[in-house]
Amino acid sequence: MLYPIAILPGDDQHAWGVEVPDIPGCFSAGDDLDDAMAMAREAIEGHLELLAEEGAAIPTARTVTLHATNPQYQGCTWAVIDIDITRYMGKAEKLNITLPGYLLNRIDEYVKHHPEQKSRSGFLAQAALRVLQGG
């Protein structure tokens, strides 16, 4: 999932600040822009681990476009951090499903050309999440 991050510029005396609008209370900072983005990833993963331990829902990432219109983030630089949220959703369980051959071939072809999907199961999990989260 692509989580937008709002980045406030730093200077010689201040760190670069980062806020993750879709994850309440998720903030970070870094010495420069690259460090701020790396620290944002750590902050997001830490928050998601805590949510998973508590059995809480994993927040859905909304679009940069939506957040950029919020006056609270005026003057921020935007980036997105790609987080594989499936690792925070519990232990994987094996199941047996039946799909039409044509659909299965299309899924396999898509996965072959989109390595971010990692596998057929990854593709199906991501597609199910999009539908269940209303996206």
Image (cartoon, helix red, strand yellow):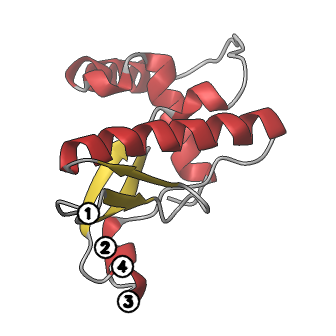
The amino acid on which the numbered mark 3 sits, given as a three-letter code, is Pro
Depicted 28 relative to depicted 74: above or below: above
**Mark-to-mark CA distance, 2 and 3:** 12 Å
Asked whether the residues under the numbered discs 2 and 1 touch, taking CB atoms below 8 Å apart as contact, a structural biologist would say no
Counting residues from the N terminus, which is met first, the one under dot 1 or under dot 4?
4
Counting residues from the N terminus, which is met first, the one under dot 2 or under dot 4?
2
* 108 left or right of 90 in image: left
**Mark-to-mark CA distance, 2 and 1:** 10 Å
Counting residues from the N terminus, which is met first, the one under dot 2 or under dot 1?
2
**Residue wearing tag 4:** 73
Residue found at the far front of this picture? 13
Mark yes or no: residue 20 visible: yes
Q: Quadrant of the N terminus?
A: top left
Image mark for residue 78: 1
User: Helix, strand, or loop for circle 1?
Assistant: strand
Pair 2/4: label in front: 4
Asked whether the residues under the numbered discs 3 and 4 touch, taking CB atoms below 8 Å apart as contact, a structural biologist would say yes
User: Helix, strand, or loop for circle 4?
Assistant: helix
The amino acid on which the numbered mark 4 sits, given as a three-letter code, is Tyr
Image mark for residue 71: 3
Asked whether the residues under the numbered discs 1 and 4 touch, taking CB atoms below 8 Å apart as contact, a structural biologist would say no
Depicted 83 relative to depicted 37: above or below: above
